[in-house]
Image (cartoon, rainbow, N blue to C red):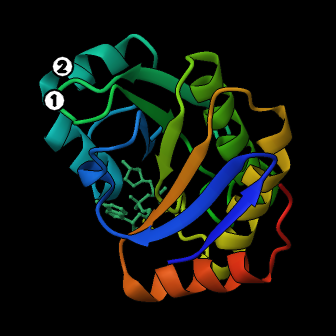
Amino acid sequence: MAERTYHAVTLETVQGDITRQDDLDAVVNAANARLRPGGGVAGAIHRAAGPGLARECEALAPIQPGQAVITAGHDLPNRHVIHCLGPVYGLDEPADQLLAACYRRALQLADEAGLTSIGFPAISTGVFGYPMAPAARVALYAVAAKADSLTSVKLVRFVLFAREDLAVFDQVLETMTECT
Ligand code: AR6
């Protein structure tokens, strides 16, 4: 677990399950273009949210790499789910810019909805094949750079499934300078 503050926005890392973040206003789904229940994060989020989420998603699909859309949280403990389509590594280019756009747009949607807290999984690092260390750098720097334009969001939590993934995020975050 590590923590840094940028322009009054706290970035923190935890090991855990994105569907079990009861104290957050929104969680982010590492979605597919059709916004359908799939494997990984998307499967877990749709299972926990119930069939109402897939019904709401139908009207919003498809989305492009780097885009994000917001829905209700349905049976999740969170008010909202923000669905991001990350780049498929080696296919959607430029991968780093598309991945950074996911984080920026998710934060923008959360801020516009007046939410104070949001949790991200490591988008694109599972089925989509983005290596964890560069993905962690893109994610953390994109969120830190966006912090000064946020008015409502105060807490951004990175929820990593595996302990070794948490260690990668922590290593990047600990080398970043604080900016309050
Ligand atoms: N909580 C937090 N992190 C998780 C969880 C969880 N419950 N489950 C997996 N992870 P992925 P992608 C981690 O594959 O690479 C889907 O089938 C996982 O270890 O969910 O963006 C969609 O339908 C990995 O580090 O997302 C798309 O087709 C990270 O979350 C496609 O996969 C992301 O893994 C999206 O691929």
Locate residue 64, reporting x and y percent: 62, 33
Q: Amino acid at mark 2?
A: Gly
Nearer the viewer's eye, disc 1 or disc 2? 1
Q: Which secondary structure, mark 2?
A: helix
Residue at point 24%, 16% (across, down): 55
Between 146 and 137, the one lying in front of the other is 146
Where, quadrant-wise, is the C terminus in this rendering? bottom right
Q: Residue at x 23, y 36 (%)?
A: 77
Q: Is residue 59 left or right of residue 136?
A: left
The foreground one among 48 and 9 is 9
Tag 1 and tag 2, C-beta contact below 8 Å: yes
List the residue tagged with mark 1: 75
Q: CA distance from mark 1 to mark 2?
A: 8 Å
Q: Is residue 130 above or below residue 26?
A: below
Q: Quadrant of residue 171?
A: bottom right
Disc 1 residue crowd, few under 14, some 14–19, many 20+, Cα 10 Å: some
Task: Tell me which residue sits at (33%, 54%) in the image.
Answer: 18
Residue 38 visible here? no
Estimate how packed mark 2 is, as few (under 14), some (14 to 19) or many (20 or more) residues with alpha carbons within 10 Å: few
* Lateral position of residue 61 relative to residue 36, left or right: right
In terms of secondary structure, where does tag 1 sit?
Answer: loop
Ligand 1 within 8 A of label 2's CB?
A: no
Q: Which residue is mark 2?
A: 52
> Residue 146, image x and y in percent?
80, 43
Residue 20 in the image, given as x and y percentages of width and height: 24, 53
Q: Is residue 54 left or right of residue 141?
A: left
Quadrant of the picture in which ligand 1 is shown: bottom left
What number of labels is visible? 2
In the rendered image of this protein, does residue 178 appear above or below residue 2? above
Tell me the kind of residue under disc 1. Asp
